[in-house]
Amino acid sequence: MRREYARLEPDPEYAERIYGLDTVSLAIIGRDPFPTAARSIPFVKEAWGQLDKRSAGYYLFRSVFGADVEQRYLTPQAAALALLDEGVVLLNASYFFLEEEPLSRQAHFDFVNESLDTNFPILERADYSLLCGDAATMMNWVVEFTGGNAEEVPHPALQARNRLPAERRGDWDRWWEVGRLRAWLHSRVLR
């Protein structure tokens, strides 16, 4: 018997724009839709005020656009669409909300595999992928990343940093401190 989870369908406009990209420079992959005020674009809430100062989206957008991201873009969705202009896409390993359960291949494999129908056409075109937190384990269940085109990174939520041993917090800082992902994009992707 298969457990049922709520599925959050990807935003049609966002998906259409992704599939229309000539180049996918970077795919940033999170675990699953966040349970509170989830939108159909990963890491996005309807308004900046809904992005808690500890949330993954808050740190992801500041890492790309700087501390003034809220002044530059009216909404998180506008920031996500601006990322598309640079070939950066936001994905979830599962588009089913897995209810904050501990990750289990037995319980969750089918949902990740079904979500691959959405992700695979994008990932096979991506120059590089960041697999955030649990998404690394989940994606490795269903896809083999070859040629050094993917990296497992800490999840961008502040609590993920706080859970890391002190000697590994620099791994989180390397990706999610203000401006860090922007610098990486410029050095690697946007040359």
Image (spheres, helix red, strand yellow):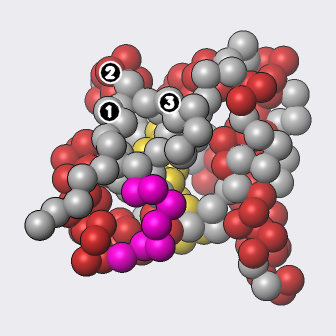
Tell me how far mark 1 sits from mark 2, CA to CA. 8 Å
Circle 1 residues within 10 Å: few <14, some 14–19, many ≥20: some
Q: Position of residue 5 (x, y in %)?
A: 30, 50
Q: Position of residue 177 (x, y in %)?
A: 82, 54
Label 1 is placed on what type of residue? Glu
Earlier-in-chain disc, 3 versus 1: 1
| Residue 103 within the segment the image draws in magenta | yes
Label 3 element class: loop
Of the residues tagged 2 and 3, which is closer to the observer?
3
Which residue is labeled 2 in the image? Answer: 12
Which residue is labeled 1 in the image? Answer: 9
Are the residues tagged 1 and 2 within 8 Å (C-beta)?
Answer: yes
On residue 125, which mark appears? none
Label 2 element class: helix
Stretch of the chain drawn in magenta: 98-104
Q: Position of residue 186 (x, y in %)?
A: 68, 45
Q: Main secondary structure of the magenta part?
A: loop
Residue 8 visible, this angle: yes
Which residue is labeled 3 in the image? Answer: 39
Q: Nearer the viewer, residue 111 or 172?
A: 111
Which quadrant holds residue 22?
top left
Task: Kindly give the residue lying farthest to the top in the view shown.
Answer: 74
Label 1 element class: loop
Q: Nearer the viewer, residue 183 or 175?
A: 175
Residue 21 visible, this angle: no
Label 3 is placed on what type of residue? Arg
Looking at the rendered image, the quarter that the C terminus falls into is: top right
Q: Nearer the viewer, residue 80 or 32?
A: 32
Residue 55 vs 164, above or below: the answer is above
Tell me how far mark 2 sits from mark 3, CA to CA. 12 Å
